[in-house]
Image (tube, grey):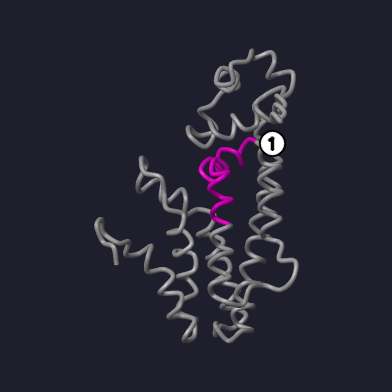
Amino acid sequence: MAKPKRRTPERILETALRLFNDFGEPNVTTAAIADEMNISPGNLYYHYRNKDEIVEALFVRYEREIDGLLTLRDTAPREVEDVWFFMHLLFETIWKYRFVYRDINDLLMRNRLVETHFQRILAHKQQTAVSLCNGLAAAGALDATPDEIAALAVNITLVTTFWLSFEQARHPRRPPDMGLGVHQALSLAAPWMREPARRLLERLSHAYIHPPSRGDTT
C-alpha cells in the first residue's frame, strides 16, 4: 500500500528546517522555501502567514522533543554509560534543530516566544544536569558538594548550549562530531569522579580524543 502523501504544512516545516539548518535561518526567505518545494508563495502563505510563524512552529516541535528528553520521569541515570548515552541523545536533538542554537542571538532579539521559552529550556537543562550529577553521586561515582554540583550543572548547560557554535567557528566548513560535544560536557565532571567511574569515562572519551588513524584495524 502506498504511503499517504504528507500534507503541505508538514512539508513546509520539513523543508524550512533543512534550509534553516543548512544556510542559517536569517538567510532563508519564505520565497526560498516555496521555491525549494516547487509551490507558489501564495500556497505557502495560506498555511503560514510569514516566516516567524514557521520559526515558531519549528521551535514548538524542538521544545516538545527536548523537554521530553530532559524530563527524567523515574530516577536519574546512575551509571556513567547511561549518562553518556543520555548526553548523546541530547546532542542528537541539538543537531536536529541546530539552527536554533546557531542563530539563537538573532532569534532571541526578535521573537518573544523563543525568548521566553528558551530561558525555560535552559533552566530545565540545568535542573536535569543537577539530577544527573546527583544520580552519579548517589551511586558513589561522583564526590562533590551540593554547591559544586550546582556550579557544574551551570557549566554543563553552557557547553551543551554553545558548543555547536564554538565548533562552527573553529571549523566552518566541516560538520562537527557531536560525540566530541558529549566528551566536552562530561569531561567537566571528571575532577569529581571516583574510581573506577573516572577510568570508565576516560575510556568512553578516548575514541573522540584520539580517533584511530586510517588503516588502523585494531
Q: Amino acid at mark 1?
A: Glu
**Residue occupying the point 60% across, 38% down:** 107
Which quarter of the image is occupied by the N terminus?
top right
Per the image, the residue denoted by label 1 is: 56
In the rendered structure, the answer to whether residue 210 lies left or right of residue 59 reads left
Residue 53 visible in the displayed image: no
Measured as percent of width and height from the top left, residue 207 is found at: 37, 65
Residue 204, by quadrant, is bottom left
Q: Quadrant of residue 200?
A: bottom left
Using a 10 Å C-alpha cutoff, classify the residue at mark 1 as few (fewer than 14 neighbours), some (14 to 19) or many (20 or more): some
Question: In terms of image quadrants, where is residue 85?
Answer: bottom right
Principal secondary structure, stretch drawn in magenta: helix
Q: Quick check: can you spot residue 204? A: yes
Horizontal side of 21 relative to 135 (left or right) equals left
Q: Residue at x 55, y 34 (%)?
A: 18
Q: Secondary structure at mark 1?
A: helix
The front one of 151 and 184 is: 184
Residue depicted at x 54% and y 65%: 156
- Magenta stretch holds residue 105: yes
Position of 192 relative to 3 (above/below): below
Quadrant that contains the C terminus: bottom left
Measured from the top left, where is residue 176 in percent x and y?
A: 41, 49
Q: Which residues are magenta?
A: 90-110
Residue 167, given in percent of the width and then of the height, sits at 41, 50
Is residue 39 shown in magenta? no
